[in-house]
Amino acid sequence: MTALIIILAIVIVIAIWAISVYNGLVKAKNRAEEAESGIDVHLNKRYDLIPNLVETVKGYAKHEEGTLAKVIEARNMCLSAKGLDEKDRADNALSGTLKNLFALAENYPDLKANANFISLQESLNRIEEEILNARKYYNATARTFNDKIMVFPANLIASPMGFRKLDYVEVADEKKENVKVSF
């Protein structure tokens, strides 16, 4: 009888431990999904701002339709992207077209002084900072989740329950290159 009680106690302790580990994994995964959603929220704010920015530039740079069309095309690619990797690739393409748009603005002094353009550019800069912070937060939550599913003994629960490693948001290769400054 005593052996049965000891075995039952061990089974109960193991069950409580397994439930606790599982619940911790679910919470960590939910935090990572929330963080990924936060990136989407900031990206959508950015995408909503871009048509206003393009319309402001159009008034000054009517013959630069090619650049403006590329910005809108890149924005639309971002809106239709699915999954973290595809969204990240589309967002990197959009960043490149926005750089071209701001370089275009350098050629139009009246545009650079336009209050609407300045306000939109400042808003875009703020949103870029928010996106950066959201990506940092996502990577931190993904790391925490990945750590939890990989360490022993939690990996004994994670793998059979279908928990898989989350990908990180990474910097595009062209952004890793050194910036060339020349005078």
Image (cartoon, rainbow, N blue to C red):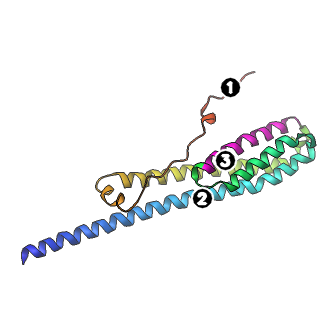
**Pair 2/3: label in front:** 3
**Residue type indicated by callout 1:** Lys
Q: Which mark is residue 50?
A: none
At 89% from the left edge and 37% from the top edge, which residue is drawn? 108
Q: Earlier in the sequence, mark 2 or mark 3?
A: 2
Bin the neighbour count of mark 1 within 10 Å (Cα to Cα): few under 14, some 14-19, many 20 and up.
few
Q: Secondary structure at mark 1?
A: loop
CB atoms of marks 1 and 3 within 8 Å: no
Q: Is residue 36 left or right of residue 108?
A: left
Q: Which residue appears farthest toward the top when viewing the image?
A: 183
Q: Which residues are magenta?
A: 86-107
- How far is the residue under mark 1 from the one under mark 2? 33 Å
- Rendering quarter of residue 161: bottom left
Q: Is residue 24 left or right of residue 113?
A: left
As shown in the figure, which amino acid type bears the numbered disc 2?
A: Gly
Going from the N terminus, do you reach mark 1 or mark 3 first?
A: 3
